[in-house]
Image (cartoon, rainbow, N blue to C red):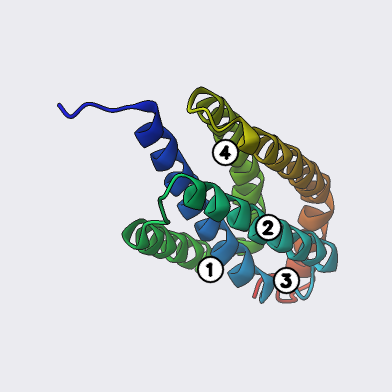
Amino acid sequence: MASTDIGTIYAGALRNTRALERQGLEQMERQLSGLERYPDYAAVLRRHIETTKGQIDRLDKALDAVGDRASTLKATATSVAGSIGAAVHAVAQDETLKNLYAGYAYQYDRIAARRSLAVIAERAGQSDKVEGFRTAVEEETKAADKIAALIEPVTKTYLDLTLSGSKADS
């Protein structure tokens, strides 16, 4: 087994986190096109897309600081995974609801990953990056709260549209 040091663990955690953020960004961008009947949901996604772009920029700077860069292979693989996930939801009658649930769960996945990344950065001697990771935790928590507040209203709109015979999804 190859030896692993904290620098290798930290760089890997940065690459993994960045790849997953790119996947999330692509999924949110794809979802926007089907949310014309859900303006509040679309507004939350638009704001979080901008936040996510800033988070990716911070991750890129953290990777640069350790002389590493994002993995093209990992970015491609997570992009394909994101496309498959979006395609699976797109064939479902309740695609909007499924995307909402997935987005809510995704926020908590990102919160956990950033909390862990802050600990890894500290141990790797990258304490100047910890504040950025903790900021991302706060950003993701706010996004999760906003998505949580949408669950009932989006579900009601979905039901109203579907039960009236209108198109509820894209």
- Residue holding disc 2: 54
Q: Crowding at label 1, few (<14), some or many (≥20) Cα neighbours within 10 Å?
A: some
Q: Tell which of 82 and 4 is nearer to you.
A: 4
Q: Are marks 4 and 1 in contact (CB under 8 Å)?
A: no
Relative placement, left or right, of 80 versus 113 is left
Which residue sits at x=53%, y=68%? 90
Q: Earlier in the sequence, mark 3 or mark 1?
A: 3
Relative placement, left or right, of 84 versus 96 is left
Amino acid type, label 2 = Gly
Amino acid type, label 3 = Leu
- How much space separates mark 2 and mark 1, taking CA atoms? 28 Å
Q: Earlier in the sequence, mark 3 or mark 2?
A: 3
Q: Residue 35 has which mark?
A: 3
Q: Quadrant of residue 158?
A: bottom right
Amino acid type, label 1 = Ala
Q: Secondary structure at mark 4?
A: helix
Amino acid type, label 4 = Asp
- How much space separates mark 4 and mark 3, taking CA atoms? 23 Å
Image location of residue 77, percent across then percent down: 35, 60
Q: Residue 90 has which mark?
A: 1
- Residue holding disc 4: 109
The answer to whether residue 80 shows anywhere in this view is yes
Which residue sits at x=37%, y=57%? 71
Q: Are marks 3 and 1 in contact (CB under 8 Å)?
A: no
Q: Quadrant of residue 31?
A: bottom right
Q: Are marks 3 and 2 in contact (CB under 8 Å)?
A: no
Measured along the vertical axis of the image, is residue 29 above or below residue 7? below
Measured along the vertical axis of the image, is residue 19 above or below residue 164? above
Q: Crowding at label 4, few (<14), some or many (≥20) Cα neighbours within 10 Å?
A: few
Image location of residue 47, percent across then percent down: 78, 61
Image depth: mark 4 or mark 3 in front:
4
